[in-house]
Image: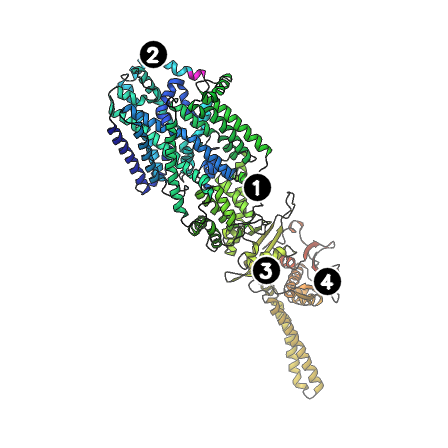
């Protein structure tokens, strides 16, 4: 029973109409992105791997080679298991670099127009047999169902419909970098259709032909030769060639590469693909034995390739046969559509655009879109032409498909070298392709037309090497890949890589970029646009620069060299997705030239390493441990309360941590990669001056956010690197905000002075009372001596003397009690005479009540000076003298002595007290530690004393005297020595 051409045409058009609706709904947003970008949709779209080979040809292949037909399933399963080391790195490269085809990928890694051209021509030649296979499968299946269907109409009609569908939903965007969600959903839908059709037909065969599973088991028991026919070839022949070919084809055929990488959704779906894709192929292949045994049980005269159609027709089930036919149309159309969409951009980028007809066109986007559409139609028609040229006696569908698989396998050495061998060269790739391609053409392509004089000797060599004469592709696989790999490795070892090849190898193998890349000569995004206009046209130049700038989140007035370099790379990546990596590199290299004298910013390398480690979620072993340590150290750096700024050898900021961001108000992302001198005020000039200064530390006052801040700056020059240059590797700055600390120190010092005043308050009354009593007595007696002028003058002189004494005491107290700092700002250092300083400190110390019973002497040679703040030094001495007096017994003496000791002035305070216990000697400088009774001391005196002495560049030492008591030695730099060093 057969069908007329009418039902076939109507069913086919209706089915393709459903595909149109699915794709249209997805393109218009009628279908949720959760479906179009779901990993299962991605896995089903990869089911385009199951073409007419799997749908029709696997049954015929099983009839001749038994269970070895499962090699196509096992190979793709192995490819999925290798996804972390093969698919994921390729997916990363295609996304980061916008490489839309296998030719783009190889042309990027092995730079040169000849690479892209050679790969494109070979991919096109290798795909034509597979395109012809799909057309042949549709034509022959239509003839089987409807003998009246003319092949001269079925083939062109099928190709015409596919051209229309491809143009409508596969060439909607001017750049192939854009994802076609509608098309991918339609391809995923087709995978479901062909799987469902095969399972329905297989289930129907079990029931209709064998009467159920029990009947099938009984038939196999009666015909053990049916099972043996499947097992014997699987035992006797090698599985290796088909496993190798199917593993490579699973991700390197043009259609698989396009779906797996170019059309991959943003959501990472490889984990789902790793099990869903093999499961889909397993279910498709599970129907093959049932269909084969059904045809054998019915003794059908038609080729086993088409048992999925002939069994329903023989059993009088035309509707089921029509469903099976639509499944075959689905398998063939999906392959043709996706393959042409993958090949058209390759041909446009590497065959048409290098002719230079598009330079400076304002309508470049539209021209590229229409050129791609023309190429899509031309490739489909070329596949039909190849089908017409095939000999009618050509072998089975699978054997024809294996011709294309062997061609695809020639790309494997280059791709493996791209991922794993940085030393591979372009010359090696081309030599390997030439050797492998010539072998493929001689052993597989030429025999399609059977010229005996050309291929007879290859068949003899194949048999002599142990390969089956019935499987020429086994010999072709071994020979072509061996010669390809040998030439690839040998030529790569004897040739030298260019600079472009080395840089591309570093990118592909995830090594850090070299330091000799240079910086962009253009100074702004607007200058980028103007320089690109002569090459790309005004519209494309503006659009691509804006696209790259927005993707990098850069402002239109960006000026930082590192960010402009990133913008240049972003423009090149965008153009790579539009016109291919070779022309993109040429266009950007011509318009956006690099300064060859500049070195790549170290900040770029650090950013690269951070991104690489952040993205490497599957790290194991030492690399994972290294990342744990890196993150720990980075966290320490970020959490430091000190601001950290590191400058690389190129003079640009490498590190700008969170504390410095909070202090300065300059965001981390805005500071990194910026030359030090171009940081916002006051930070740029501040760091630049500190970098040039001979010293390493400085204390400055700056205005930040309208407020005065006191900063302590530390500079450290990093040690020379171990490389050949041995040059300086950069400078690190530490920034401490001392504003609050200085203010607190000033308040504490003032409180300590007030506490000291409190301790001498009682003595003040006594000291002032004595001169007041003298003044009162003299005044009372003065009235009796008015007649004696000399006596009056003498008495008035005594009164004035006592008043000056009171004034001196009051001024000393007021001056000592007054705060010497305002807001933490110290008074400038001046030259301070040591003798008067000791005298005034001794006088103040004598005012305390305890000092009435303790003698206080001072001694200092004339002309002894130090440089500092007189008031703060006086506070130091008063504090030390007060402590000494408090510790001394009544009737004893406290001595204050000063002497020159080399370039130092040494001041000693000695008492005759009980001394300091050894166990307390380490704690006396701790804040709030005191040996006095509660209410007699704050415990801050010696802490403040030590801080003041340290600020003056001096030292403080406390020790016990051998004859009892304590000696405090204060050493300060001499003023005349400092002056001599400054003048020198």
**Which comes sooner in the sequence, label 1 or label 2?**
2
Where residue 700 is drawn, which disc sits there?
3
**Which comes sooner in the sequence, label 4 or label 1?**
1
Local SS, label 1: helix
Check the image and report above or below for 612 versus 233: below
Asked if disc 1 and disc 2 are in contact, CB closer than 8 Å, the reply is: no
Asked if disc 4 and disc 1 are in contact, CB closer than 8 Å, the reply is: no
The CA distance from mark 1 to mark 2 is: 67 Å
Residue beneath disc 2: 223
Q: Position of residue 423 (x, y in %)?
A: 57, 35
411 left or right of 267 in image: right
Between circles 2 and 4, the one closer to the viewer is 2
Q: Quadrant of the N terminus?
A: top left
Give the class, few, some or many, for how many residues have Cα within 10 Å of label 2's Cα (few <14, many ≥20): few
The CA distance from mark 3 to mark 1 is: 47 Å
Main secondary structure type of the part rendered in magenta: helix
Say which of 3 and 624 sits in front: 3
**Which comes sooner in the sequence, label 2 or label 3?**
2
Between circles 3 and 1, the one closer to the viewer is 1
The CA distance from mark 2 to mark 3 is: 99 Å
> From which residue to which does the magenta span run?
233-237
Q: Position of residue 781 (x, y in %)?
A: 66, 82
Which residue, as the protein is rendered here, is positioned at the far top?
222
Q: Position of residue 837 (x, y in %)?
A: 68, 66
Check the image and report above or below for 783 versus 534: below
Local SS, label 2: loop
- Count of marks placed on residues: 4
Q: Quadrant of residue 940?
A: bottom right
Where residue 499 is drawn, which disc sits there?
1
């Amino acid at each position: 029973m057969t069908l007329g051409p009418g039902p076939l045409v109507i069913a086919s058009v209706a089915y393709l109409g459903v595909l149109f609706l699915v794709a249209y709904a997805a393109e218009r947003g009628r279908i949720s992105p959760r479906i179009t970008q779901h990993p299962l949709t991605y896995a089903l779209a990869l089911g385009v791997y199951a073409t007419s080979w799997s749908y029709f040809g696997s049954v015929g292949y099983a009839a001749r080679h038994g269970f070895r037909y499962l090699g196509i399933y096992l190979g793709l399963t192995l490819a999925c298991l290798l996804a972390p080391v093969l698919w994921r790195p390729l997916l990363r490269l295609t996304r980061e670099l916008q490489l839309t085809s296998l030719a783009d990928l190889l042309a990027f890694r092995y730079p040169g127009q000849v690479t892209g051209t050679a790969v494109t021509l070979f991919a096109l030649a290798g795909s034509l047999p597979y395109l012809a296979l799909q057309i042949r499968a549709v034509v022959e299946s239509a003839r089987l169902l409807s003998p009246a269907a003319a092949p001269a109409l079925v083939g062109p009609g099928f190709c015409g419909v596919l051209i229309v569908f491809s143009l409508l939903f596969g060439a909607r965007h001017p750049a192939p970098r854009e994802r076609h969600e509608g098309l991918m959903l339609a391809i995923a839908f087709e995978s479901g259709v062909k799987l469902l059709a095969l399972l329905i037909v297989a289930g129907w065969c079990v029931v209709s032909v064998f009467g159920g599973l029990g009947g099938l088991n009984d038939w196999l028991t009666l015909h053990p030769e049916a099972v043996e026919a499947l097992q014997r070839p699987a035992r006797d022949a090698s599985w290796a060639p088909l496993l190798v070919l199917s593993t490579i084809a699973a991700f390197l055929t043009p259609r698989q590469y396009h779906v797996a990488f170019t059309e991959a959704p943003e959501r990472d779906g490889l984990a789902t693909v790793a099990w869903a894709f093999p499961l889909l192929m397993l279910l498709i292949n599970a129907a093959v034995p049932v269909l084969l045994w059904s045809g054998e049980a019915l003794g059908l005269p038609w080729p086993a390739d088409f048992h999925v159609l002939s069994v329903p027709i023989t059993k009088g089930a035309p509707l089921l046969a029509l469903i099976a036919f639509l499944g075959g149309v689905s398998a063939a159309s999906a392959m043709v559509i996706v393959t042409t969409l993958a090949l058209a951009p390759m041909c446009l980028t590497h065959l048409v655009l290098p002719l230079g007809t598009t330079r400076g066109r304002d309508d470049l986007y539209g021209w590229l879109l229409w050129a791609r559409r023309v190429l899509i139609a031309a490739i489909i028609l070329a596949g039909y032409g190849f089908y017409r040229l095939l000999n009618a006696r050509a072998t089975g569908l699978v054997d024809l498909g294996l011709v294309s698989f062997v061609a695809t396998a020639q790309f494997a050495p280059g791709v493996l070298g791209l991922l794993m061998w940085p030393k591979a060269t372009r010359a090696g790739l081309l030599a390997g392709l030439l050797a492998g391609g010539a072998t493929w053409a001689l052993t597989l392509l030429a025999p399609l037309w059977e010229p005996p004089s050309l291929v007879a000797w290859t068949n003899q060599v194949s048999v002599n090497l142990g390969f089956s004469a019935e499987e020429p592709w086994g010999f072709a696989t071994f020979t072509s890949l061996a010669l390809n790999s040998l030439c690839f490795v040998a030529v790569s070892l004897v040739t030298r890589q260019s600079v472009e090849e080395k840089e591309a190898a570093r990118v592909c193998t995830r090594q850090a970029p070299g330091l000799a890349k240079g910086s962009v000569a253009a100074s702004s995004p607007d200058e980028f646009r103007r320089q690109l206009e002569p090459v790309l046209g005004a519209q494309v130049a503006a659009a691509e620069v804006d696209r790259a700038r927005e993707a990098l989140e850069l402002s239109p007035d960006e000026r930082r060299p590192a960010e402009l370099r990133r913008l240049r790379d972003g423009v090149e990546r965008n153009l790579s997705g539009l016109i291919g990596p070779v022309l993109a590199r040429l266009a950007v290299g011509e318009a956006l030239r690099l300064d060859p004298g500049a070195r790549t910013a170290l900040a770029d390398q650090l950013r690269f390493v951070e991104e690489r480690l952040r993205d490497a979620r599957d790290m194991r072993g030492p690399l994972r441990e290294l990342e744990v340590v890196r993150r720990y150290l980075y966290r320490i750096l970020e959490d430091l309360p000190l601001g950290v700024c590191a400058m690389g050898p190129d003079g640009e900021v490498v590190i700008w941590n969170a504390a410095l961001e909070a202090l300065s108000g300059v965001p981390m992302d805005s500071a990194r990669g910026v030359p030090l001198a171009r940081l916002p005020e006051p930070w740029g000039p501040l760091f630049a001056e500190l970098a040039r200064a001979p010293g390493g530390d400085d204390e400055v006052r700056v205005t930040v956010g309208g407020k005065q801040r006191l900063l302590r700056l530390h500079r450290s020059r990093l040690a020379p690197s171990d490389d050949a240059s041995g040059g300086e590797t950069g400078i690190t700055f530490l920034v401490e905000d001392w504003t609050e600390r200085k203010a607190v120190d000033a308040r504490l010092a003032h409180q300590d002075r007030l506490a000291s005043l409190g301790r001498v308050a009682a003595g003040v009354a006594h000291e002032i009372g004595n001169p007041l009593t003298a003044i009162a007595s003299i005044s009372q007696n003065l009235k009796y001596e008015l007649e004696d002028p000399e006596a009056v003058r003498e008495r008035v002189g005594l009164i004035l003397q006592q008043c000056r004494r009171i004034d001196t005491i009051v001024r000393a107290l007021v001056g000592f009690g007054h705060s010497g700092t305002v807001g933490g700002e110290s008074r400038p250092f001046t030259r301070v005479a040591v003798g008067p300083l000791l005298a005034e400190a001794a006088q103040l110390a004598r005012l305390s009540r305890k000092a009435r019973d303790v003698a206080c002497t001072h001694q200092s040679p004339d002309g002894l000076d130090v440089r500092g703040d007189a008031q703060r030094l006086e506070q130091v001495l008063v504090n030390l003298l007060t402590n000494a007096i408090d510790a001394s017994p009544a009737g004893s003496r406290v001595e204050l002595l000063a002497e020159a000791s080399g370039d130092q002035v040494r001041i000693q305070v000695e008492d005759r007290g009980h001394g300091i216990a050894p166990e307390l000697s380490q704690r006396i400088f701790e804040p709030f530690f005191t040996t006095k009774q509660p209410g007699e001391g704050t415990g801050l005196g010696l802490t403040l004393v030590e801080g003041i002495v340290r600020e003056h560049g001096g030292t403080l030492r406390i020790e016990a005297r051998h004859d009892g008591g304590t000696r405090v030695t204060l050493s300060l730099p001499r003023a005349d020595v400092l002056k001599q060093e400054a003048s020198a």
